[in-house]
């Protein structure tokens, strides 16, 4: 690659990244479309990235991408990190659906659905889980019946992140009730279709980006099925791999908690964090967090070199454990100041940390629970037989 | 496994094949039955030297290949897999590093070629009391005449029974220094320590041992620099030990029948295996990062070494215990290898700082 690309990227980013967004947490823009739309700086940043063609760096140009290499993508990412910028198009469509469509969709579907994802214009949500189908996803019941010129869908989805602000939903639906995995199809549903209703679910952390989605006599065009009829489980499983990939690496780097502990817990006569038990557990978490970030880096390097690497199911569990422990430690460090919900008497950082701790309990549930990941590791990586 | 270059891949494959053919666990069992000295099989060590492993860290001017610590770690991991016992770490890592970093070119020219050729074995005499505390040796070196008089005791001196010379840490008026002491020096007595594992460990008494002025190695950060190289390679060895313990246990889960089925079908055991796999991978990343950081002279190398050694200690403890538990009663027998893996894990964990030592060192390096 021409060595000039790094300078080009740095120059473009310096000129186009809105300084007001520097070092902001990008996560809320991903999970809350309403929050994203209301932020003029974010909208500007997303549009500039899209116009530059960097909304989907490695996708082919014909599908709205920049047609560049993974190496280019990494350089852009590194140059972004240098100035506190972030990729504004890190959406569910971009990370999960797009790569799946590139593998499984028809040419017409790719040309229709990929460019709006690359440009950050179409917001997608994931209609997989149901009230009766969580870890046992293949037991899903949302019914999809062939009505000749369209599909008719009835059922309910749950834990659908961002459904209340999504334009589209990629769904797993049941097209054959006589077979479990073999009776599932992969369907793309326009959220504006009559009969689609998304209701936010308030979580223990007070946030609402998870929704229930009710599907009542929803008519879906025949051409919106991806892959073969009753072939959706294969498509969905591949998409879940992309989801695990995106979840596994996204908590790699975290700042040490030493300053926070000094502030709230204080230090002893030798300048060490005062409480020896808390200090010991902070040290242990610091060590594991550092090893985890090296594991993410190693997995990336090995994947790039085409080598066998750590199972993503194990990586997801390690990351969830380290970050849950960290979120827990932060609240423990804050003591009574870590108990605030809102209003006076607590700083914004304290309240954010408390809510982040509550939210962190979801790390080991979403994207396949801790236990499901262990099943996958045991079966696919360690070659142990299915339990009976 | 890190992304290796062609040379490293070849070396790994060669080490794997050699250990399997020449030094399987039965070799350790044979050593256990033998007399205490020297604590390893000299014929096997000669083969290791012939393959160039003793020279991986030595410069080309001394007959070495200067391939670096990541490469040495690759070999150590393979040796750890089958519990090979040899002075490679003491001599090929510890002594070579001390002689390269110690600012004593005359000593280096005298000893490095012999170490690389496998003719000489050098041991590190660092530990004294029950706990690893290299910064505060009780053994003293006092100036006398044109040289130094060493007084004190060291234990355990790993590979001490095989050593032709020792690198002895001592408190001097100018801080801690290393002294190169010939095994035959008057006033030095070497007694065997029979431990749970075979490594030729010795108790060394230095009863007013006289050495010349030029036997002193003393450059800023020398002891830490030497110890960190040894620790990182030991962590790689521990990784291999744990990896093989895991593979053996996994094989057992796939073959042992109870209640009319393979026990590996039980989810309770599957999830334990999956968790062990995760810990193994986490530790591998830390070990490789530490070795690479030392090769690159990265500013956070010391911290990464402690991360790696602490995690490797956690890993071997857990893996050793789980290997026995998942094997059940057979794992408790001396005939089965599980106990050998548990013992080797414990010994390596205690070598050059255990989990608690390295967690605390990491903490102090990072402001906890």
Image (cartoon, coloured by chain):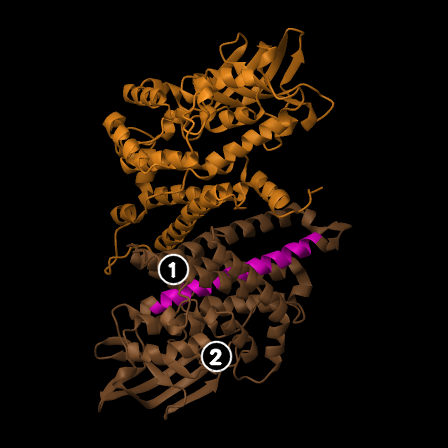
Chain colours: A orange, B brown
Residue at 71% over, 21% down: A177
Q: Residues within 10 Å of mark 2 (few under 14, many from 20)?
A: many
| Front residue of B303 and B86 | B86
Question: Relative to B339, is B7 on the left or the right?
Answer: left
Of all chains, the one bearing label 2 is B
Q: Quadrant of residue A172?
A: top right
Give how far across and how far down residue B99 sits, in percent. Answer: 34, 74
Q: Is residue A115 above or below residue B64?
A: above
Give how far across and how far down residue A209 sits, in percent. Answer: 43, 24
Question: What is the count of numbered marks?
Answer: 2
Q: Quadrant of the C terminus of chain A?
A: top right
Residue at 36% over, 41% down: A331
Residue at 42% over, 48% down: A294
Does A56 appear in magenta?
Answer: no
Circles 2 and 1 on the same subunit: yes
Which region of the structure is painted magenta? B226-254
Does B244 appear in magenta?
Answer: yes
Q: Is residue A98 above or below residue B224?
A: above
Residue A184 appears in the figure: yes
On residue B74, the disc is none
Residue labelled with disc 2 = B201
Q: Is residue A189 above or below residue B33?
A: above
Residue labelled with disc 1 = B305
Residue A207 appears in the figure: no
Give how far across and how far down residue A169 sits, in percent. Answer: 51, 18
Label 2 to label 1: alpha-carbon separation: 24 Å
Question: In the orientation shown, which residue stands out farthest toward the right?
Answer: B260
Of all chains, the one bearing label 1 is B
């Amino acid at each position: 690659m021409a060595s000039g690309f790094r300078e080009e990227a740095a120059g473009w980013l310096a000129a186009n990244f809105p300084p007001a967004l520097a070092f902001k947490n990008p996560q809320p823009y991903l999970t809350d479309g309403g929050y994203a739309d209301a932020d003029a700086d974010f909208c500007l940043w997303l549009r500039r990235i899209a116009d530059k063609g960097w909304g989907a760096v490695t996708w082919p140009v014909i599908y709205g991408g920049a047609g560049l290499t993974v190496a280019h993508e990494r350089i852009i990412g590194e140059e972004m990190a240098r100035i506190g910028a972030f990729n504004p198009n890190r959406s569910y469509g971009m990370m999960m659906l797009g790569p799946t469509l590139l593998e499984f969709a028809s040419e017409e579907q790719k040309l229709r659905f990929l460019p709006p994802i690359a440009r950050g214009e179409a917001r997608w949500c994931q209609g997989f889980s149901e009230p009766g189908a969580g870890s046992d996803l293949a037991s899903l019941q949302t019914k999809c019946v062939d009505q000749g010129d369209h599909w008719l869908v009835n059922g309910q989805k749950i834990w659908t992140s961002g459904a209340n602000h999504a334009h589209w939903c990629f769904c797993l639906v049941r097209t054959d009730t006589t077979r479990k995995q073999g009776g599932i199809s992969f369907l793309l549903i326009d959220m504006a279709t009559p009969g689609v209703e998304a209701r936010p679910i308030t979580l223990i952390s007070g946030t609402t980006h998870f929704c229930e989605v009710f599907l009542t006599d929803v008519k879906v065009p025949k051409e919106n099925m991806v892959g073969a009829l009753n072939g959706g489980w294969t498509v969905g499983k591949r998409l879940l791999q992309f989801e695990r990939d995106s979840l596994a690496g996204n908590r790699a780097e975290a700042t040490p908690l030493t300053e926070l502990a000094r502030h709230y817990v204080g230090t002893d006569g030798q300048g060490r964090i005062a409480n020896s038990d808390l200090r010991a557990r902070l040290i242990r978490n610091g060590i594991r967090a550092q090893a985890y970030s090296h594991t993410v880096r190693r997995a990336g390097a090995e994947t790039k070199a085409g080598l066998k690497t750590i199972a993503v199911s194990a990586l997801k569990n390690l990351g969830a454990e380290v970050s849950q422990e960290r979120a827990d430690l932060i609240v423990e460090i804050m003591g009574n100041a870590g108990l605030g919900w809102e209003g006076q008497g607590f700083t914004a950082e304290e309240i954010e940390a408390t809510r982040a701790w509550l939210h962190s309990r979801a790390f080991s549930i979403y994207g396949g629970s801790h236990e499901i990941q262990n099943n996958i590791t045991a079966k696919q990586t360690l070659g142990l037989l299915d339990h009976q | 496994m890190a992304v290796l270059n062609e040379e490293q891949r070849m070396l790994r494959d060669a080490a794997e094949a050699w250990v399997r053919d020449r030094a399987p666990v039965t070799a350790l069992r044979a050593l256990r039955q033998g007399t205490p000295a020297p604590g390893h099989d000299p014929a096997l060590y000669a083969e290791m030297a012939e393959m160039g492993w003793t020279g991986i860290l030595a410069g080309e001017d001394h007959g070495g290949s200067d391939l670096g610590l990541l490469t040495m770690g690759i070999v150590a991991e393979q040796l750890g897999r089958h519990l090979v016992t040899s002075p490679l770490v003491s001599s090929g890592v510890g002594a070579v590093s001390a002689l390269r970093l110690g600012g004593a070119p005359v000593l280096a020219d005298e000893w490095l070629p012999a170490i690389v050729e496998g003719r000489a074995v050098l041991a590190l005499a660092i530990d004294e009391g029950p706990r690893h505390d290299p910064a505060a040796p009780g053994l003293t070196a006092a100036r006398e005449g044109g040289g130094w008089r060493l007084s004190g005791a060291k234990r355990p001196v790993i590979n001490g029974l095989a050593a032709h010379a020792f690198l002895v840490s001592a408190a001097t008026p100018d801080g801690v220094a290393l002294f190169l002491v010939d095994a035959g020096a008057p006033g030095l007595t070497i007694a065997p320590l029979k431990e749970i594992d075979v490594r030729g460990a010795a108790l060394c008494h230095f009863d007013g041992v006289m050495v010349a002025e030029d036997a002193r190695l003393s450059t800023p950060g020398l002891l830490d620099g030497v110890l960190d190289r040894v620790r990182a390679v030991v962590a790689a060895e521990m990784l291999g030990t744990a990896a093989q313990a895991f593979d053996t246990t996994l094989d057992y889960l796939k073959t042992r029948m109870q209640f009319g089925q393979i026990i590996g079908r039980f989810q309770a055991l599957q999830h334990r295996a999956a968790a062990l796999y995760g810990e193994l991978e986490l530790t591998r990343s830390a070990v490789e990062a530490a070795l690479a950081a030392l090769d690159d002279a990265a500013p956070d190398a010391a911290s990464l070494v402690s991360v790696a050694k602490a995690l490797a200690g956690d890993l071997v403890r857990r893996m050793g215990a789980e290997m026995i538990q998942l094997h059940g009663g057979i794992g408790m027998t001396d005939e089965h290898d599980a106990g050998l893996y548990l013992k080797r894990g414990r010994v390596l964990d205690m070598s050059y700082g255990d989990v608690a030592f390295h967690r605390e060192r990491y903490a102090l390096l990072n402001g906890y």
